[in-house]
Image (spheres, grey):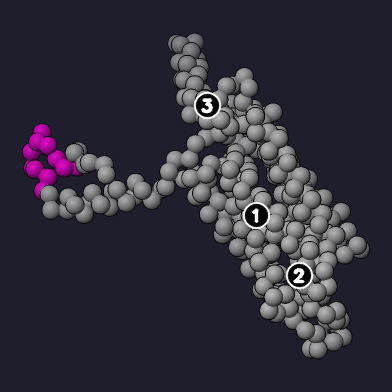
Amino acid sequence: MEERRGNIKAENEMNINMKEEQSTFDWRGRPSNPNKHGGFQAASFVLGLQAFEIMAIAAVGNNLITYVINEMHFSLSNSANIVTNFVGTIFLLALLGGYLSDSFLGSFWTMLIFGFVELSGLILLSVQAHVPQLKPPKCNMVTDGEKCEEAKGVKGLIFFVALYLVALGSGCVKPNMIAHGADQFNIQTKKLSTYFNAAYFAFSVGELIALTLLIWIQTHAGMYVGFGLSAAAMAMGLITLVSGTLYYRNKPPQGSIFTPVAQVLVAAILKRKQICPSNPNSNCSMHQTQRF
């Protein structure tokens, strides 16, 4: 009996794995090959992106308030609001990234497109921090805070555009990194739990480097160097992501989640006056609902 149950369980797992393989595709849209696509070989490229991306964004976010006060000359209260709004926007936009991935783009293309958006924001931050004409005149906020000119007009616009390009890119990339890596494994495999451990390790390594080396460089070499290194880290992450293109197995987007909801609402409105017969053997509109 136990042997029979084991055989049935193994057969069910095999059927699930076969269905998963049939529902995933390579970069050309062809059904994925389990001997060529997926597994740790493919997931390792995603882990590289995760380490580099968190390295870039952590180095910017954790020392941003210093830059906003000392270089942009915003007050302490305004600077705190700018930083918290920036961080909050990243996490809110994670919902947008997940929606676009599941409904239209797929996780790979969402990461690639918005990875370049994040990179463009980091480059713009670095350029502004390096070019004096794009910043307010130098001023000591500790001794002459009231006399210091705050970033306004074009200078302020450039700063906020760059900052929220970073937020948009990072927010839409974050929910797809772990998801795309997990897509490289079958649900039933034990390797999936190992992958999640590796993903957390990659996150921790990137965070560690950002909060030690990159923050130290920002403090001693200048913010423009630090922002430039963050941009370089993000560029390396994108190169790593693209390098694994031939090995990924990709799940196709499922279409807008609002479409089936709208179908149900329209059907309910159109059939609102129909009465279900008391005889359970008779046809009932609940069993004959049409899809639009």
Secondary structure of the residue carrying numbered label 1: helix
Q: How many residues crowd mark 2 within 10 Å: few (<14), some (14–19), many (20+)?
A: many
Position of the N terminus by quadrant: top left
Comes first in the chain, label 1 or label 2: 2
The residue beneath circle 1 is 117
Q: Residue 9: x percent and y percent? A: 48, 19
Q: State the separation of the CA atoms marked 3 and 1.
A: 28 Å
Q: Residue 46: x percent and y percent? A: 68, 38
Q: Report if residue 223 lies within the magenta region.
A: no
Quadrant position of residue 168: bottom right
Indicate the amino acid at tag 2.
Ile
The residue beneath circle 3 is 30
* Residue at x-position 69% and y-position 28%: 41
Spot the residue most to the bottom: 147
Check contact, mark 3 vs mark 1: CB within 8 A: no
Q: Residue 149: x percent and y percent? A: 77, 84
Q: Residue 279: x percent and y percent? A: 8, 38
Indicate the amino acid at tag 3.
Arg
Asked if residue 74 can be seen in this view, the reply is no
Q: How many residues crowd mark 1 within 10 Å: few (<14), some (14–19), many (20+)?
A: many
From the image, state whether disc 1 or disc 2 is nearer to you: 1
Comes first in the chain, label 3 or label 2: 3
Find the magenta span and give its range.
275-286
Q: How many residues crowd mark 3 within 10 Å: few (<14), some (14–19), many (20+)?
A: few
* Residue at x-position 85% and y-position 79%: 138
The residue beneath circle 2 is 65
Q: Nearer the viewer, residue 197 or 88?
A: 88
